[in-house]
Image (spheres, grey):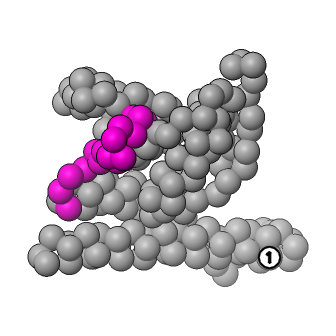
Amino acid sequence: MNDVTVTKFKFFWAHQDQEQEAWLRAMAQQGLHLVSVNPFCFWTFRRGAPRDLVYRLDFGHGRTDDGFAQLMEDAGWTLATTCTGWHYWSIPVTNGREPEIFTDGASKVKKFQRLLALLVCSALPAFIMVVTTDKASLPSRLSLPSLVILSGIYIVLFAMLGYSALQLLLRIRAERALQRA
């Protein structure tokens, strides 16, 4: 029975780490334990006994980054999986205590800054392409349906990237406000 896997589709925005953590904990409490996640939002779980596991997400620390993985494992955390720079750590809840990876606001801010930097860098090539393309000759090189589809793709891409960047900036601002309070 432990070898049975379940795959679910669930989309999260880049700034929704707390929502992911809560959802993963609820899955573990139902006996679904995270095995992997892919960039297309398909989550694979192994069915097992229900457990109260806390999941915490980190972004940008590699498995060997400054001994971070060893530090986490020494503290009792288990690396459940990684996906596109995200690291999904889990630890059992003991005595009602829900451990945190980041105990200070500055570390949380750095996590979101690393994510924001990746987001900006990934949008840069598309932005450069849009800016440097000869727009006057574009209609003669592409059919109208192709031009409409391409424009739609770019509009959706930039809207999603803009929304994600804005939400990350708001999370950074909120964390900094908590630090000052």
Task: State the predominant SS element of the stretch in magenta.
Answer: loop
Q: Residue furthest bottom?
A: 136
Question: Helix, strand, or loop for circle 1?
Answer: helix
Residue displayed at 18% across by 56% down: 104
Examine the structure image and report whether residue 99 is included in the region drawn in magenta.
Answer: yes
Span of residues in magenta:
89-105
Q: Is residue 174 above or below residue 61?
A: below
Would residue 20 be visible to someone looking at this image? yes
Q: Nearer the viewer, residue 21 or 123?
A: 21
Closest to the observer, 73 or 176: 73
On-image quarter of the C terminus: bottom left
In the rendered image, the vertical position of residue 155 relative to residue 7, given as above or below: below
Residue 128 seen by the camera = no
Number of numbered discs: 1
Identify the amino acid type marked 1. Val
Tell me residue 40's x, y (percent). 67, 47
The residue positioned 45% from the left and 63% from the top of the image is 15
174 with respect to 154 (left or right): left
Between 175 and 130, which is closer to the camera in this rendering? 175
Q: Position of residue 80 (x, y in %)?
A: 48, 31
Image quarter (top left, top right, bottom left or bottom right) of the N terminus: top right
Q: Is residue 65 magenta?
A: no
Residue that appears at 33% across and 41% down:
95
Residue position for label 1:
148
Q: Residue farthest to the front?
A: 95
* Left or right: residue 174 compared with residue 8: left
